[in-house]
Amino acid sequence: MPCTVIAGGFWGDEGKGKIISYLALKDKIDVCVRTGSVNAAHTVWIEGKRYAMHMVPAAFVHDKCRLLIGAGANVHVAKFLEETELANVKSRIGVDQQASIIEEKHSAQDKASAHLKGIGTTGWGVGPAIEERVRRTAKLAKDILELQPYLTDVAEEANSAIDNGKKVILEGTQGFMLSLFYGTYPYVTGRDTSASAICSEAGIGPTKIDEVLLVFKAFMTRVGAGPLPGEIPKEEAVKRGWFETAAGTGRERRSAPFNFEIAKKAVMVNGATQVAITKLDVLYTKCKGARKYEDLPAEAKEFIKEIEKQIGVPVVLIGTGQEVLDIIDRRA
Ligand code: IMP
Ligand code: MG
């Protein structure tokens, strides 16, 4: 455990928020570093209440956890302030002074660009904000008055936590197939989303990582344009209970069955040591709320075994419902 990277294996929306919030509570995580930007909404259900966090790390549910936003991230100041208030985490959240800022103008540029519209971006302006950073004209967190109380050196904090044997999670955003390098270019997000990039954005070197936990959903979904192998029509998705709308933008998600070839490639490039499968109860309704592997119906166990056989990595966590504790935990 000490330092675990959590990355998405498909097109985002695999349930990283649920897995991270579970680990935060169960393992009493000390530090959680979020990467990426406001385009990702990480959903957490706790005691019947739903949070869709765009900025605050999903480990906020554990009230002793220090929450950090890495230097590689893009901070949406208004959303950050709104969510820190909502989650009541002002006293324990920090932003790296070198994180860059995503502004309203970036969102306007995103929405005005015919090309980006064709890709079906979330419209938050993450691509344009990254362009601005690359041009060396971006504002940084240290330039923003409202962020002064939160400024810190995330690399310093996170590395010293690891060196002191504390439990640290690096929270990735989006999924492998949305990676600028490995995804379905040009139908991708503006950055690499793999485990190495998550480490880089957080300021943690690869030798400090103990586990890479890759999160897959039991079926695949995708919002926006671009290929989705095995895609089924919306009516069929509704019939199967796979139909979802996006937590962030409310857009309809397209869906397809679990794809072993994509999963294998994602495991390889991320260097995954462990895998989580979420929403198993959507494929096999008898799994709903199960918290023990033995309680799963035979066909659900077969599916999990098949995944392990094909990808060569153990499935350690299995999601069986929306609540944070609806999980089968098979770790030793
Ligand atoms: P952008 O990241 O807003 O530029 O959008 C680029 C592509 O990534 C679009 O297909 C978006 O729908 C997708 N995307 C970005 N963030 C997320 C996410 O958090 N979940 C799922 N899809 C995302
Ligand atoms: Mg999401």
Image (cartoon, rainbow, N blue to C red):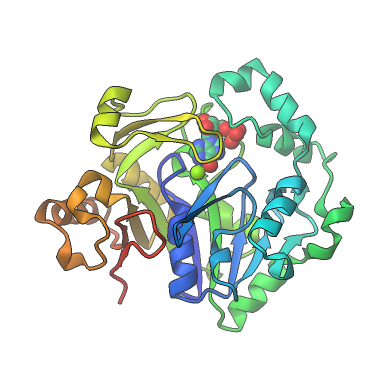
> Does residue 143 appear in the picture of this structure?
yes
Say which quadrant the N terminus sits in: bottom left
Nearest to the observer: residue 255 or residue 246 = 246
Q: Up-down: is 250 above or below 25? A: above
Q: Give the vertical position of 98 relative to 262 (above or below).
A: below
Q: Residue at x 19, y 48 (%)?
A: 284
Q: In the displayed orientation, state which residue is furthest to the left.
A: 298
Q: Kindly identify the residue that appears in the image at 64 percent across and 30 percent down.
A: 123
- Residue 168: image location, x then y, percent: 55, 71
Name the image quarter holding the C terminus: bottom left
Q: Residue furthest top?
A: 114
Answer whether residue 210 is visible to the viewer in this image: no
Q: State which quadrant residue 134 falls in.
A: top right
Count of picture labels: 0
Observer-nearest of 294 and 201: 294
Looking at this rendering, what residue extends furthest in the front direction? 48
Q: Is residue 258 left or right of residue 184?
A: left
Q: Decide if residue 170 is on the left or right side of residue 95.
A: left
Residue 258, horizontal then vertical, whole percent: 28, 40
